[in-house]
Amino acid sequence: RSEQFTIVRSMIDLGHNLGLEVVAEGVEHAEDLQLLRRLGCDLAQGYHLAQPLPDHELLAWLGAHDPATAAPQPSM
């Protein structure tokens, strides 16, 4: 687990050092999202946040959710 943590932290740092916005894919658990927030990950996607949806369902979902609460914020 510590090797995985080191790899993820290094990838986030690398992306930021290159001036990129970092997106974590495949986030399936609240604990993973919390860790990504602490590490400064910019954005996340995965089943924990929302499952893939047809376009008409996506529009309804977006209308019912505030995107700012679903995306990890940089930790400062």
Image (spheres, grey):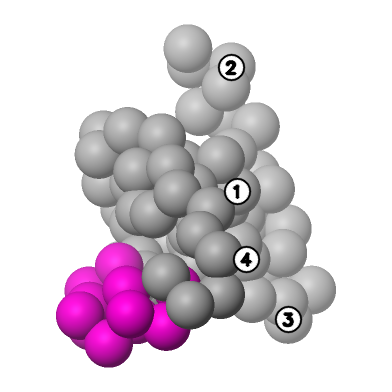
**Is 25 covered by the magenta stretch?**
no
Q: Dot 3, how many residues are within 10 Å of its Cα: few (below 14), some (14-19), or many (20+)?
A: few
Q: CA distance from mark 3 to mark 4?
A: 9 Å
Residue 30 position in % (x across, y down): 25, 39
Marks 1 & 4, CB-CB < 8 Å contact: no
Disc 1 or disc 2, which is closer to the eye? 1
Q: Secondary structure at mark 4?
A: loop
Disc 1 or disc 4, which is closer to the eye? 1
> Quick one: label 2 or label 4, which is nearer the N terminus?
2
Q: CA distance from mark 1 to mark 2?
A: 18 Å
Q: CA distance from mark 3 to mark 1?
A: 19 Å
Vertical placement of residue 71 versus 9, above or below: below
> Quick one: label 3 or label 1, which is nearer the N terminus?
3
Residue extent of the magenta highlight: 58-70
Q: Which residue is mark 1?
A: 25
Marks 1 & 2, CB-CB < 8 Å contact: no
Residue 9 position in % (x across, y down): 55, 43
Q: Is residue 49 left or right of residue 55?
A: left
Disc 2 or disc 4, which is closer to the eye? 4
- In the image shown, does 66 or 68 lie closer to the viewer? 66
Q: Which residue is mark 3?
A: 19
Q: Which residue is mark 4?
A: 22
> Quick one: label 2 or label 3, which is nearer the N terminus?
2
Vertical placement of residue 32 versus 72, above or below: above
Q: Which residue is mark 2?
A: 3
Q: CA distance from mark 2 to mark 3?
A: 24 Å
Q: Which quarter shows the C terminus?
A: bottom left
Report the residue at 41% width, 35% height from top.
28
Residue 76 at least partly seen? no
Q: CA distance from mark 2 to mark 4?
A: 19 Å
